[in-house]
Amino acid sequence: MKVQEFDSLSEEIQALVSSSIEARKLAYAPYSKFYVGASILTTSGTLLHGANQENASYPLCLCAERVALSYASMHCPDAEFRAMAISTSAPLGPDDIPAPPCGACRQVLMEYQQRQSSPIKIYLVGHDRNVWIYDSIHQLLPHSFQGDFLNK
Ligand code: THU
């Protein structure tokens, strides 16, 4: 993982990060008030986004990352995902560090990464304009469970 300031990112990645911040406005999070936006950049340059969608029956809440992945996969079924940016709007504590994706979202991200030939980069957006960058979902989920194990 490396940390980079927003201003030092390429224009394309700045647009991705900004899109994830904008996507937070689409969150439906009346229960947690934890607003999450996730945006995907495809290898052809398309941006697609998602936000968390909650339900009074709490276990039915959908994370922003998985909303974005499903939306992107439906709209651009042949696309490869180059990167995902994730941003949250709740106060993050004294250091203002970004909130990383939950374990379930990491597992789903891994499945999407395995369906394509290149890694998905992850950009986690903090409130202090520092962005945490992971070159592959492998860095967030080492030793993952994979479909290969089912076919032995
Ligand atoms: N949430 C996400 O959107 N992504 C994560 O990776 C973790 C949690 C959402 C789900 C729920 O709406 C709220 O954050 C609190 O858990």
Image: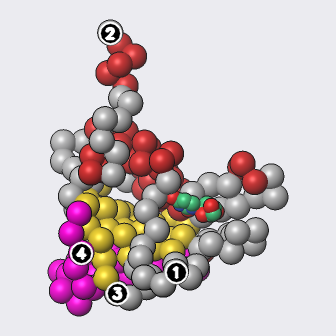
Q: How far apart are marks 1 and 2 (CA)?
A: 46 Å
Query: Marks 1 and 4: in contact by CB < 8 Å?
Result: no
Name the residue: 80% across, 52% down: 57
Work out whether residue 39 or residue 45 is closer to the camera in this orientation and state it: 39
Query: On residue 129, which mark appears?
Result: 3
Q: Give the range drawn in magenta.
A: 1-25
Disc 1 crowd rating (10 Å Cα; few below 14, some 14-19, many 20+) is few
Query: On residue 93, which mark appears?
Result: 1
Q: How far apart are marks 3 and 2 (CA)?
A: 46 Å
Query: On residue 3, which mark appears?
Result: 4
Q: Distance between the residues labelled 4 and 1?
A: 18 Å
**In this rendering, would 14 be left or right of 68?**
left
| Image location (x, y in percent) of residue 77 | 37, 47
Q: Name the residue under label 2.
A: 152
Quadrant in which the C terminus appears: top left
Q: What element carries label 2?
A: loop
The residue carrying mark 3 has its beta carbon less than 8 Å from ligand 1: no
| Amino acid type, label 2 | Lys
Q: Distance between the residues labelled 4 and 2?
A: 40 Å
Q: Does the magenta stretch mainly form a helix, a strand or a loop?
A: helix
Pointer 1 or 2: first along the chain: 1
Regarding ligand 1, which quadrant of the image does it lie in?
bottom right
Quadrant in which the N terminus appears: bottom left
| Amino acid type, label 1 | Gly
- The mark lying in front, picked from 4 and 1, is 1
Query: Marks 2 and 3: in contact by CB < 8 Å?
Result: no
Pointer 4 or 1: first along the chain: 4
